Amino acid sequence: MVPMERKILRGDRYSQILQSGLVRPRFLRKNELEGQWRQTLPNLARLPEPFPIFSADEESILAWGYPVYRSEGMRRLRSQLERQIGRELEYRNLKKPDPDDRRKLVRGREGITESLENAFLNAMLNDYGRSLVEVFVLWLSTDIQKLLAAVPRFLKNNSTAREDINVTVRQLASMLGGLMLKGVTQAGDQVRNLSDTPERTKSSPLFDLICRDPLLLVEESLPSSPDRLAFLLSSHSVGDVKTLLALSSKVGEKFSEILRRRPEWRGIIRHVCGSDFNPTGPDAALELSFLDLVETVGLSVDLGLEQDVIPKLQTLGLRLKGLELAATLRKGILAVDRNSEGQWEMKVGGRRAVIAASSRPYDFAAHGVVESAVFRFGLIYDLTNFTAVLEEVRRAGRSAEEKALQFMYVFQSRTEQIQVGRRLTFEKFMGDGAFFSARRAARTLAAACEIQQAYDRLRHEGFPFDKGLRIAVNAAEYRLLPMRGADAGRPTYEFFGHGIVELARLTTGKSTREVSQVAELLVHAGYDPEHVDDFLRPLIEARVKKTGQARRLYAATLDDHGELINEGIVLTVAFVEALGLELGTCALWEGESDGLRWLVLDIDPGGQNPLLVGIRLLGVARLKGLEPVELVEGLPWPEKGPPPLRRLKQTTDLVDALRRVGGLESSDADSPETRTISEDLVVVNFTETTGMPRWILGEYRSSDDVILHGLHVPLVVPPDAGPIEMWLFRSRFDLAGMYEVLRRESSGVARPMSQMREQKDFRVWFLAAPHRSP
């Protein structure tokens, strides 16, 4: 990410709309457009920050703004508003309306109020500091303004006078603004009752600004005509708007005369009010800094400004600045639709464009407003035996503690450099490590390899936390929980759900975590860390079973019970599948390292130097609280190690390539020729009533047509795997091994084949010979 883009993403978001949407500002000054508006209009500082809308490949920003999904519910609300405007116009055209006509009109207004109340209630209950009410007001006022813009054409066709047209439109805007106020008030009362709070919810300054004056419900931006501006502005808070605007114009003329006599004032004005301010224009007396200056130096009388008028001009000037700010930010409302293929789509530069699938547009008609589920690539690293090492350092004295702190600072700095360079997002620290998320699989895996390499270099430099580094990477659906941070106006998001649980389990494994917990317990109880290590070493070696697979310093293995021992980099099969789709057809090699066969690929083909990574199938792991998951080990391919053995055929299906290279086989494992598969082992597939595919592995008993020890297995068949029989034949040993692991944990259930044959899309194969079926 380039430095400027990184800066924009971190803070200068408003300027993306303010500086592009307001070409010729009238009331806002240049410094206010660049951010000073927060000091000028502190009540509006709760305005929501615009979001970057990414392209379909998530590599570029197409626009900045507030994406709103035009869902069925949102379209219904717009239709409701449109029909009500039609009813209002028809009612006004009636010469002698009867009570029934009036009742229909009132019912329509009550229906809109109820719909608005539900939408506002939805926004309030799910706000968490995200300014959802403000975004809804921006969208709603935009829709109302567009609907009211069509009213003059309708009235002209009925030969209505121009003055009457303007009055009618203003009355409609005031009526709709009143319905918005009523809807938000009733929603606020509901929230108050639900929370059992006696005080009323404070209204939003942006809401008051847009709804209490009909201006922004009628006009897209502030009109240049003073008469039109005065006509649409309420006088309840600033007095006679038309008189004040005329006075401001006269002040500009009088100051023009002063400049002719005293030209040195130009430099003073430029210094105090900014180079973009025109002190001789019709809006001169509406600029606060100018009013402060003339009052301070005693020019008020010369300019015809009485003492009691200056506060009114200041109030009107602030209101006009706020209206101009709201009108400009409202241009950031971006309508988003689903196309026929289910992709997000919106208009960019006059053309329809597909935007990132990870976009989460607002939908105020849907529960929660913003979809909490996101698909991300996650990465967690965890320092092995961190607590025990920390206790050793503490006992070694102050000097050792300071040295460890310096090393930890260097490690965190190098990790941050990798994170920024690979465009990962730091989410939070977790225990002895950290959690990152990303939108690209290749960047995530590259970061995992580079973090391991950075850690290895520090180990050789004397890093005290030298017991190892566990890394886990996955591709999963995460849930984002909005949380109020220290800055109440800017929420933070907490990742939770299956994705984060899976990563945590993959990082620590189960058995090794149990040993680590015992070690920490003994160390905290006062036992010497070295004695604890000596005491637990036989248990660790027995659980890990130091085979050829585990002789490497950074290695991941599965024990005989399907439990994960992760001291290296572990990936999920879902992540590898996504990596293959992302890289496309890329160069692949078969390599050998430490007596194991690896699939080797370059995960940074566009980089200056190739970044070769080896991956191999580990097998199916049983992780605490989770469904069985198939895992892959990753390894930064040694620069000075043996070169890859041979070039393989290019493919996007990395999982299939992994199985072809060797899958679960190792140097001391039996070859496929020596392994056998039970002739009774079958694979059953059918579609459930929910539309989800169901896969079952079990042992077929022909005497009564029953499957014994049937186990549900979440299989994923690659889309380009070819005939299912061929895929089953290629994967038969892996599937048989998976079944063996699962059978150690569960006896399964007996299922009559006759019942399953009645299911939709039923198919069955003998795994040893998939061309045959019972």
Image (tube, rainbow, N blue to C red):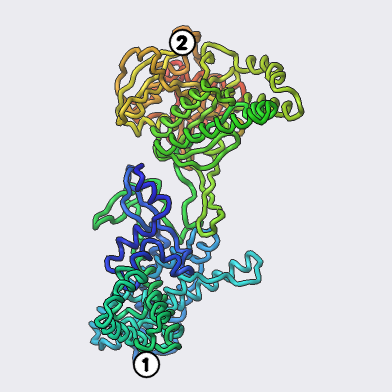
Q: Do we see residue 123 in this rendering?
A: yes
Amino acid tagged 1? Lys
Q: In this orientation, which residue lies closer to the viewer: 695 or 625?
A: 625
Where residue 628 appears, as percent x and y from the top left, is 55, 29
Amino acid tagged 2? Gly
Q: Which mark is residue 595?
A: 2
Quadrant of residue 328 within the rendered picture:
bottom left
Judged left or right of residue 93, residue 456 is: right
Judged left or right of residue 404, residue 605 is: left
Q: Is residue 633 above or below residue 273?
A: above
Q: In this orientation, which residue lies closer to the viewer: 333 or 568?
A: 568
Residue at left offset 33%, top offset 31% = 583
Where residue 740 appears, as percent x and y from the top left, is 56, 19
Residue at left offset 33%, top offset 81% = 229
Q: In this orientation, which residue lies closer to the viewer: 748 or 320?
A: 320
Q: In this orientation, which residue lies closer to the viewer: 741 or 637?
A: 637
Q: Few, some or many C-alpha atoms within 10 Å of disc 1 (few <14, some 14-19, many ≥20)?
A: few
Q: Which callout, 1 or 2, points at the residue further toward the start of the chain? A: 1
Residue indicated by mark 1: 96
Q: Is residue 125 above or below residue 217?
A: above
Q: Nearer the viewer, mark 1 or mark 2?
A: 2
Q: Do the residues bearing badges 1 and 2 touch, measured as CB atoms within 8 Å?
A: no
Where residue 608 appears, as percent x and y from the top left, is 30, 29
